[in-house]
Image (tube, rainbow, N blue to C red):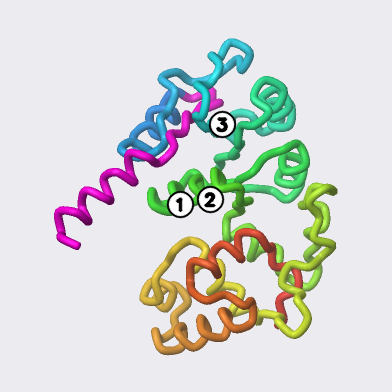
Amino acid sequence: MSLHSLIEGRRVLQQEEPSTTVFPVCGNPLLRIGLETVLSGGRFQVWHEAVDDVSVLPEAPDGEAVLFIIDGQSYRDETVNVINRIKTRFPDARIVILAEMFEADLVSAAWKAGAHGFCLSNSQREILIRSLELVMLGEIVLPSAFVLSMTGPNADLAALSPAENSEKGEAYRLSGRKLSVREAQILEYLREGAPNKVIARRLNLSESTVKVHVKAILKKIGACNRTQAALWATRHVSTDAEA
């Protein structure tokens, strides 16, 4: 196959990628502008106005996916009510909460109400886009820092799972497949798409050590590659990491 054919094939695939309309629910117009800038040039098309009233939004074109990004700072006390209004008007829409930090009670309430992702507003562009793409693929996304903060001996994430989607505490407890704290940390970096070099620098490890941990992680969770490991990490919240 010629280089021209490969380029043309890639162009066709990009054209066939489903478009997603993003409705920013926020009280800060700068946030909408920021989202429009960050998400430009890809599958996400940001609505031209900040959304205050969901009921006045137009119907989404047939076949076009819809994503709502809620400003978790502006609507902290109204998050659940906003989600309920969105689900009533757009039952098939995906919903992401964007904030500088997350508290367990807010995440639990928003998740039970129907939120699909929780992203940090200070995330790198690539990480934010990857997280939103995972949400649109049907995955649940949580910030790695939040997940790791809940891996202590007294952590209890049972309340974070909606009753209908409860894995009954499975998480990292798969028999014979418990991950160490270090492996849990590295797995979260894999979920963010970080290469071994970056992981090694952040955890003050050598790349060779990171490679050994990655190999062990893949074996324990039954993944064939880093991508599968990242998807697995998105589906499972570590609640039983070993010290």
User: Of helix, strand and loop, which one carries label 1?
Assistant: helix
* Residue named by callout 2: 134
Labels 1 & 3 near each other (Cβ < 8 A): no
* Residue named by callout 3: 68
User: Of helix, strand and loop, which one carries label 2?
Assistant: helix
Horizontal side, residue 107 vs residue 186: left or right: right
Horizontal side, residue 48 vs residue 52: left or right: left
Foreground pick, 215 / 74: 215
Mark nearer the N terminus (2 vs 3) = 3
Mark nearer the N terminus (1 vs 3) = 3
Q: Is residue 22 magenta?
A: yes
- Range of magenta residues: 1-28
* Residue named by callout 1: 130
Looking at the image, how many numbered discs can be counted on the residues?
Answer: 3
Q: Is residue 42 magenta?
A: no
User: Of helix, strand and loop, which one carries label 3?
Assistant: strand
Tell me which amino acid carries mark 1: Arg
Labels 2 & 1 near each other (Cβ < 8 A): yes
Residue at position x 46%, y 48% in the image = 128
